[in-house]
Image (cartoon, rainbow, N blue to C red):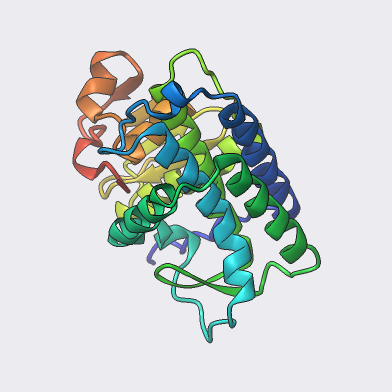
């Protein structure tokens, strides 16, 4: 018999909404204290400065309220599991929108406040099953909110990388959701059960075609920490670099994920 189809991971909508708002508030507070010189610093995101990165963070949250204000789409086009694969196609439009906002001289603190206020007005009482139109298709609101944890956590890490010592903290629930979603994306990209990927304390997934293990320690194991995993999945670091820095342990002849990463960039 073929293996049973894995059930999609479930997320608590209330916890996700709380995590998104908490991480956003933390980033907003950190950005409010930046100097003009810090805002002009380069980031690892092409030629974006810290200012453009911060503007993008306001747009990532603002997208929720904007989508709720728009007509509801007819169907779901995007699931949590395949969302990451579509992000590259939207990168050009995202870049254009960010540059338009920054070139217009918008005040960052005002942008952060406006996005938070609009969401506070639009979100209460709306069920997670409500469909929203995001950049590349229809998605449930509950799933779209989970993707906001990825946007916020990944770009919080970008902010910390651009400004050493800033050390913006990560909401635990947001970090957990981001880690799990990207781990599940790997399992979808490379289905199978020959490699076990462990990202304690948040996720364990099996992937890659080949012999399955049924008990005991699997023959192919990859283990890393959540932030290293997120950097690998999003192209912020490479498999070889992470191995060389002992940020990843990999045992077994199939435990090389270099050809599968990044999942999004």
Where is residue 204? Give x, y as percent.
49, 38
Question: In percent of the image, x 53 and y 42: which residue is there?
Answer: 152
Depth check: give the residue in front, 218 or 92: 92
Residue farthest along the right direction in this orientation: 125
Residue 144 in view, yes or no: no
Where is residue 141? Give x, y as percent.
62, 66
Above or below 253: residue 146: below
Above or below 159: residue 191: below
Question: In percent of the image, x 43 and y 43: which residue is there?
Answer: 183
Where is residue 158? Give x, y as percent.
41, 31
Where is residue 133? Give x, y as percent.
51, 73
Residue farthest along the bottom direction in this orientation: 74
Question: In percent of the image, x 32 and y 48: which residue is there?
Answer: 264
Question: On the rendered image, what quadrant is the N terminus found in?
Answer: bottom left
Question: In percent of the image, x 42 and y 47: which residue is there?
Answer: 102
Above or below 137: residue 88: above
Depth check: give the residue in front, 64 or 28: 28
Instruction: Name the quadrant containing residue 214.
Output: top left
Depth check: give the residue in front, 78 or 24: 24
Instruction: Name the quadrant containing residue 46.
Output: top left
């Amino acid at each position: 018999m073929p293996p049973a189809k894995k059930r999609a991971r479930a997320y608590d909508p209330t916890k996700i909404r709380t995590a998104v708002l908490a991480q956003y508030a933390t980033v907003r507070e950190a950005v409010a204290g930046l100097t003009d010189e810090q805002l002009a610093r380069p980031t690892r995101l092409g030629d974006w400065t810290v200012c453009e990165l911060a503007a993008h963070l306001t747009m990532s949250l603002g997208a929720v309220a904007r989508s709720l204000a728009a007509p509801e789409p007819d169907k779901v086009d995007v699931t949590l599991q395949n969302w990451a694969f579509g992000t590259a196609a939207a990168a050009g439009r995202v870049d254009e929108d960010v540059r338009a906002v920054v070139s217009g001289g918008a005040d960052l603190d005002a942008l952060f406040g406006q996005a938070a206020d609009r969401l506070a007005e639009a979100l209460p009482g709306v069920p997670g099953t409500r469909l929203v139109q995001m950049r590349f298709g229809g998605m449930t609101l509950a799933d779209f909110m989970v993707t906001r944890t990825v946007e916020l956590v990944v770009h919080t890490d970008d902010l910390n990388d651009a400004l050493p010592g800033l050390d913006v903290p990560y909401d635990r629930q947001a970090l957990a959701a981001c880690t799990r979603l990207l781990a599940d994306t790997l399992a979808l990209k490379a289905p199978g059960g020959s490699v076990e990927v462990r990202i304690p304390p948040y996720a364990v997934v099996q992937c890659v075609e080949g012999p399955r293990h049924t008990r005991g320690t699997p023959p192919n194991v990859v283990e890393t920490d959540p932030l290293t995993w997120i950097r690998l999945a999003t192209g912020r670091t490479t498999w070889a670099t992470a191995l060389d820095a002992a940020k990843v342990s990999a045992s077994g002849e199939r435990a090389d994920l270099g050809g599968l990463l990044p999942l999004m960039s």
